[in-house]
Image (cartoon, helix red, strand yellow):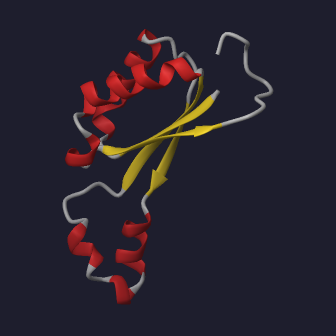
């Protein structure tokens, strides 16, 4: 089992992503409103005021999608994300990573 985490910088793609999740068999996720550290530092801490220019034009809030998935869903999910968002390394659309997890309690067995 894996915990798939997508930090989505471009909220306009959320619906297309969630539809894709369902199509590949990921039917449960938690979506959290989040904010990046750079936005807080650039607005609240004068010493980091130069960071404000790095983030000009970007949105201060993100959506973070958490999904507990079977190992075999990782590749289809990576392909979906690339299809909807483009290559994350180049686009600034978000960050995706996967963490190995042990016990999961409270989820239906079909996960």
Residue at x 25%, y 65% (from the top left corner): 55
In this rendering, the answer to whether 107 lies above or below 33 is above
Q: Choose between 48 and 103: the one closer to the eye.
A: 103
> Residue 99 vs residue 89: left or right?
right
Q: Please indicate, yes or no, whether residue 18 appears anywhere in the rendered image.
A: no
Residue 92: x and y in percent read 25, 49
Residue 9: x and y in percent read 33, 46
Q: Quadrant of the N terminus?
A: top right
In this rendering, the answer to whether 101 lies above or below 40 is above
> Residue 70 vs residue 75: left or right?
right
Residue 45: x and y in percent read 41, 84
Residue at x 50%, y 19% (from the top left corner): 73
Q: Please indicate, yes or no, whether residue 93 appears anywhere in the rendered image.
A: yes
Can you tell which quarter of the image residue 91 is in?
Answer: top left
Can you tell which quarter of the image residue 70 is in?
Answer: top right
Q: Choose between 53 and 43: the one closer to the eye.
A: 53
> Residue 99 vs residue 109: left or right?
left
Q: Choose between 21 and 44: the one closer to the eye.
A: 21
């Amino acid at each position: 089992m894996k915990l798939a985490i997508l930090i989505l910088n471009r909220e306009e793609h959320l619906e297309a992503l969630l539809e894709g999740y369902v199509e590949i068999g990921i039917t449960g996720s938690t979506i959290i409103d989040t904010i990046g550290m750079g936005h807080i530092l650039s607005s609240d801490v004068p010493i980091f005021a130069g960071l404000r220019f790095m983030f000009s034009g970007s949105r201060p809030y993100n959506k973070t999608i958490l999904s507990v998935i079977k190992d075999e869903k990782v590749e289809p999910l990576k392909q979906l994300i690339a299809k909807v968002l483009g290559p994350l390394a180049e686009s600034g659309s978000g960050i995706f990573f996967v963490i190995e997890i042990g016990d999961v309690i409270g989820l239906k067995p079909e996960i």
